[in-house]
Image (cartoon, helix red, strand yellow):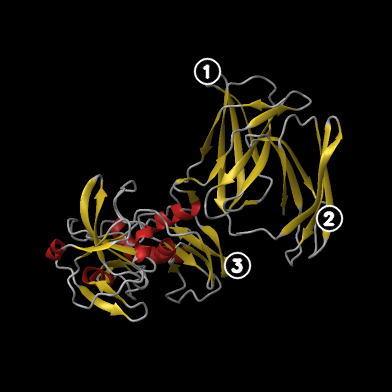
Amino acid sequence: MVLVLLGTVLVASTPASDIGTYAFEQVWWRTDLPVRENQADRTWVWGPEPISPLLLEPYDEGHASGVDGARWVQYFDKTRVEITRSDGDRDDSWFVTNGLLARELITGRMQVGDGRAIEYGPAAINVAGDHNDSTGPTYQSLNVVRDYEPLPNGTVVTQTINRDGSVGHNADFGDYNVETATRTEATSRTIASVFWNFMNSEGTIYDGFDYVDGRLFEDPFFATGLPITEPYWTTVRVSGEPRDVLIQAFERRVLTYTPGNPDGWRVEAANVGRHYHQWRYTDQGDPALSSTDLTARRDLSGNLIFMGEVRNGARAPFAEVEIDLTLFDEAGEEITSSRTYLDSAMIEAGEALPFQIWTEYDGDYASYDVTLRSRPSHRFTRPNITVDAVQADWESTNRYEVSGVARNTSGQTVEYLQYIVALYDDAGRVVDYRWNLMDPISLAPDEEVHFDTFFFDPGRFSEYRIFVLN
């Protein structure tokens, strides 16, 4: 018998993290330690604290403490700091970089190697102001104007940008007296004077020993990268109130100038790091991982077995997915809880994988909660395994068999090969589940292996799905 249940899916939140490496701390200290310790009254360059733990992310040319094809990263409000090669020269001023996040958000091309990117489309996330402002420009808006003609140096900036990317002109913005200051040959873009002044500004910094006066940036383009749009005025809502803001996109940051802000806070870096983390690791702002409604059946002892699917709605893979199930009675009191892990070590972007979770409970219950925990994976895809010669049929009135042949077409030896066959009902819910190791569990390139599994008294289902994992 299959039971259809009502339940809630929860996703564990991630608390604020410590800065993950000494090299990252050194970069952060220079400009932001004085702000945190009230030694300087100015905008954050990185952010008050990391918004993610130290992560491994895939990057073709990366080398992260012995892991090839990955690099160490950590996210802050304003950026992502990176060590692409941990075996590099630590005295090099570019040993730690901050990611080309603004460029990726605007173009929609997630860079996973020097010459390789994955196309996702520009991010429909507000560049500045309230996250729910429906009128301000998004990164998608800035993508529209990437190829517009540059303004001559010394031009008073009065051009505007709307949410749809259309460009206009409002002479009233000339009252703020912001001019274009310099043009970069590499991108043929002019930089607004307020931003150029900020990029070359001096103030209190921390040099590793003491607070001293110095340049915020030894290289004015270190934090921002090169400009990739012209400066534009726009109106965004901040705490629901309209504010005039000048914005300009650079490769690594989007800088904003708000004339109404206090001194030291008029030029700010938009929260590109937080926006990018949302774009890459969430499902349009919702948790990346979600669970379908569960079904349940009982084992021979009468204990409940629950089945469902974990879905990854993000643009990045996740690893080591932990699934916690809690059962409640009619009064909302906890009866019992169980934990399992997704049988696949990784769930790819956009992928859905079935799971089952066993309990040692044979009684009744009123509701359940599912909590999912995971971490981003530094692998993007599994080796390619094809499945052919699939046969599925009733061997007897109560036994359903599914078999096939798996072939390794990836060009590399695949270890710990396993497979899942799941049965689904008309509503797309998992109603039965089998997991097995292939025999043999290791396949060289172009080798194949036969597999088969049986379901006894599976109940009503409409289709089967085969998942081959390693």
Q: Is residue 5 above or below residue 136?
A: above
Between the residue at mark 1 and the residue at mark 3, the CA separation in whole angstroms equals 51 Å
Furthest residue in direction right, as rendered:
396
Q: Is residue 418 left or right of residue 236?
A: right
Tag 3, which secondary structure?
A: strand
Q: Which mark is residue 449?
A: 2
Q: Is residue 444 above or below residue 321?
A: below
Image coordinates of residue 410 in percent, x first then y, are 72, 64
Image coordinates of residue 88 in percent, x first then y, are 53, 75
Image coordinates of residue 341 in percent, x first then y, are 65, 43
Identify the residue position indicated by label 1 in the image.
Answer: 331
Q: Quadrant of residue 64?
A: bottom right
Q: Nearer the viewer, residue 168 or 449?
A: 168
Q: Quadrant of residue 99?
A: bottom left
Image coordinates of residue 397 in percent, x first then y, are 85, 30
Tag 1, which secondary structure?
A: loop
**Mark positioned earlier in the residue sequence (1 or 3):** 3
Quadrant occupied by the C terminus? bottom right
Q: Residue at x 43, y 49 (%)?
A: 16
Between the residue at mark 1 and the residue at mark 2, the CA separation in whole angstroms equals 51 Å
Q: Residue at x 59, y 33 (%)?
A: 293
